[in-house]
Image: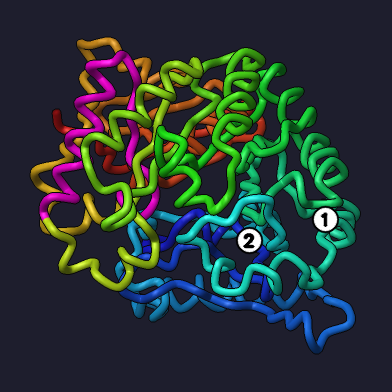
Amino acid sequence: MRYKCCNLLTEGIEFRYNGVALCQRVDHVGGGDIVVQTYDDKKDKKFNFDINKYFKKRQEVIEQNKSGNIYHKCEGCIELHERDWPELENQKISQMILHHWTKCNSHCIYCYTNQNKEYYNNRKSYKILPILKQMDKRKILDFGGKCSFAGGEISCLPEFEKIVKILDKYDWVPIFNSSCVKYEKTVEKHLKNGNGMLIVSVDCGNKDLHKKIKQADTFDIVWKNISKYANAAKHKYMIYTKYIILKDINDNEQSITEYLEMSKKSKIEYVLMEIDHYYFLDNRENIPKYIIDLFYFAYNKAQEMGLKCEIYSNASVLLLQGKWADSFWKPYVFDAGKEIDKYLFRHVLKVDSNKNTIEYESIKTAAEDNSLTYIQIWKTCERNKKKNTHKISGNIYYYKS
């Protein structure tokens, strides 16, 4: 049946510190935030997650979208795509975001936990391991998925290694977001094996500014650990440093240049540019042009230095849906007469230029490619488990230099 939907609805789940939601997108007109179940660490002695309640809510939202009356919290989301969506034969999950814990060894000024660091570092988080074991027992986790550890900090998560073991059982791609204050052998192992990603939001390239943004004197150890991970990784594209533009703090060319220089010095080849989440939500229609210009500057400066610069989450929404979209992006058109861009599409098996469709060599490599953020894909996914292939179609955009 043809209707508007997305793979986050059909495949995804988000475990938040205060409950469970269908997806993580909260940067569009409808606001997302489709909550399934809540958790209050001050009231609830235990979190009894009801997976059946989750699947019921998921089906409810999908059925409303089928009717042509888009679920109000999905309205305007960049993930929505109109196509013939297959009926969900099995209750499966292949995309997961974990930020059920809030403890961290950094103190970023832009993080919501900065409002009350003592509380968030000591609050009682619910245990995710029993929930994953329940999913494992019921065969709910699909093969070849992806999981983002969004934080708190992974080195402050007691269940971390056991969680990763369950994901490994299903050959999932783990996306590790880390402060890099502490070096994690589990992360190193996955990078060495070529299965996983590491994203480190460093936000600057000099010691004084680092101390101001992170409120911690950890500049040297963070970059030292980044270098160690870079040396360990099987592929350079498995590690990204990230720069969040913070108004009146690091929103200038000098700071961005210092960040790019430190990344290159630390053997990083892939960098991410982002905008402060809360600033974006509050000012999405009034982002000053100089901030847009900084994205241009960062991209071109990175290219000049031999680095690959990609646009991250909120910034991609700003630059794809905002008034700047036409000047920043252009569609990628498949041409049967030309070789496919191996930087944009690393694991592609073949291309159907007539249908604007790309087919991956395996479900797992498709999951890995789609964890990356160097392009924006209005993606629809069709899995063929018998052939172990994974097709993606839709409008594909990349930076217009």
The span picked out in magenta is 289-315
Who's the residue at 61% across and 43% down the image? 179
**Residue 313: x percent and y percent?**
39, 50
Compare marks 2 and 1 and give the one earlier in the sequence.
2
Who's the residue at 66% across and 15% down the image? 232
Horizontal arrangement in the rendering, residue 400 relative to residue 53 (left or right): left
The correct choice, above or below, for 264 with respect to 364 in the image is above
Does the magenta segment cover residue 306? yes
Quadrant hosting residue 392: top left
Mark sitting on residue 132: 1
**Residue 174: x percent and y percent?**
66, 38
Q: Work out how far the residue at label 2 is from the one at label 1, CA to CA, in angstroms.
A: 12 Å
Q: Main secondary structure of the magenta part?
A: helix
Horizontal arrangement in the rendering, residue 131 relative to residue 333 (left or right): right
- The amino acid type, in three-letter code, at marker 1 is Leu
Specify the quadrant that holds the C terminus: top left
Between 247 and 73, the one nearer to me in the picture: 247
The correct choice, above or below, for 6 with respect to 284 in the image is above
Mark sitting on residue 122: none
Does the magenta segment cover residue 181? no
Mark sitting on residue 13: 2
**Residue 96: x percent and y percent?**
64, 53
Q: Is residue 81 visible?
A: no
